[in-house]
Amino acid sequence: MTIDTEATTPTAQLDVAKVRQDFPILQREIHGKPLIYLDNSATTQRPDSVIDAMSDFYRTSNANVHRGVHLLSEEATDAYEGARSKVAAFLNADSTQSIIFTRNTTESINLVAHAWARRHVREGDEILLTVMEHHSNLVPWQLLAQERGCKLRFLDIDESGHLQLDHLDEVLNEHTRLVALTHVSNALGTVNAIPTIACAAHSVGAKVLVDGAQGVPHGPVDVQALDCDFYAYSPHKALGPLGIGVLWGRRDVLEEMDPFLGGGEMIRDVTLERSTWAAVPHKFEAGTPSVADAVGLGASIDYLNELGTAAIRQHEVRINEYLLGRLRELPWLTVYGPQDPHDRCSLASFNDNQIHAHDLGTILDQHGIAIRAGHHCAKPLMRRLGVMATARASFYVYNDLDEVDRLVDALFEARKVFGLAT
Ligand code: PLP
């Protein structure tokens, strides 16, 4: 696994108190209580260095990229392309040209659905997904299936929330063109065995797309070791800005793909009748890009590298051990997903047996605790679990064990509000 789920290598521990000082929003009070931000799987907060990098760009170097012959435009282009290089190194990509900037994970997946799958998937072909996918990695394939008459198949989970890898052979065959699955489940926390699945997919000639929205935030990601063909993620879930996304693809695969959107920046030549395309990655980046967001993304990668991705993973395992232990003390709570702290990212999805998840979310908010309640854009998974919704508390680099205790205290308080036994 390229997320070090064992976390056996000793690394420097995160100094959480020091980390917290870098995040101005953590000084806020919510309903008169200090903010405890546990909605990191939805979006994380940004450190000063990211906010400053973006505002410095607008203050000192703002210009459009690639086209200008003036100094500001050259500086903006260097900043934009510099961010691409940082992302490539961060993901251990084979080449900087294989990094495409999009708006988010959703757009990255849609790009593959349009520019790769519409050329390669025909009636009678199959696409393998899993029952734990976020709607972002489900709906684009449903649209394709309606249009192309291909079949969607699904790998199920077992009772512990792991994919049933022993059933892979039954759902993969010579008709499978693509396996598209999440690296880490946003609703269970499960870390999936991507290299094992990629090996099986490649053995039948299928390509592999990994939805890394929850993968990148939680540990070192090495796209080459994962052995996938596409990897999509949203920097806003790893301390970066909202509004920019990343798609990594194998260079040879990207080169033979059609464009996604047409317009300026993505062409080599244009006549009134037809156009030819720029080389990758620019072929996939039509129009003026989010330059300041790319600059912020570069700064977020610098920050994560400074903390150390292995140290981040160890911090998460520590949070998990404590969190799962504390939640097990509450007999009225069902906690979903793998129970081994090494085997999941640092989120807990749970239900009180008497209180609806939305009510829990509202009561916790009164205590200054921000969690998410609902279907987490994974409605099929909720159905598979037999629930309408769960409450989800998701932790990141600035969360500490004390906040786990505050969460548990608030879960007791919620029982009191409803007059229920504890
Ligand atoms: N995939 C997973 C697993 C996610 O958790 C999310 C967001 O929560 C997404 C995809 C979609 O990310 P975005 O809305 O940034 O495109």
Image (cartoon, rainbow, N blue to C red):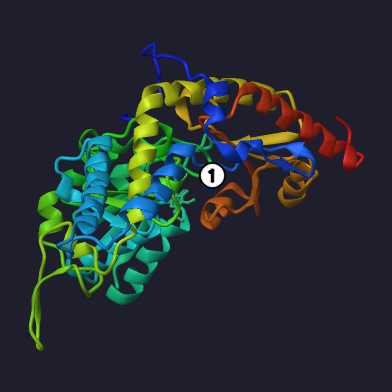
Q: Which residue occupies the extreme top position in the image?
A: 10
Q: Is residue 332 above or below residue 247?
A: above
Q: Residues within 10 Å of mark 1 (few under 14, many from 20)?
A: many
Q: Which residue is mark 1?
A: 187
The residue under the point 82% across, 39% down is 414
Q: Nearer the viewer, residue 39 or 96?
A: 96
Q: Is residue 207 visible?
A: no
The residue under the point 66% across, 27% down is 404
The residue under the point 53% across, 37% down is 159
Q: Is residue 355 left or right of residue 129?
A: right
Q: Amino acid at mark 1?
A: Ala
Q: Is residue 58 left or right of residue 224?
A: right
Q: Is residue 420 above or below residue 377?
A: above
Image quadrant holding the N terminus, namely top left
Q: Is residue 332 above or below residue 187?
A: above
Q: Is mark 1 within 8 Å of ligand 1?
A: no
Q: Which residue occupies the extreme bottom position in the image?
A: 272
Q: Is residue 397 above or below residue 297?
A: above
Q: How many marks?
A: 1
Q: Position of residue 99 (x, y in %)?
A: 22, 49
Secondary structure, mark 1, is loop
The residue under the point 31% across, 38% down is 194
Q: Position of residue 232 (x, y in %)?
A: 32, 50
Q: Is residue 377 left or right of residue 103?
A: right
Q: Is residue 190 visible?
A: yes
Image quadrant holding the C terminus, namely top right
Q: Position of residue 368 (x, y in %)?
A: 73, 40
Q: Using the rendered view, name the quadrant where residue 66 is placed.
A: bottom left
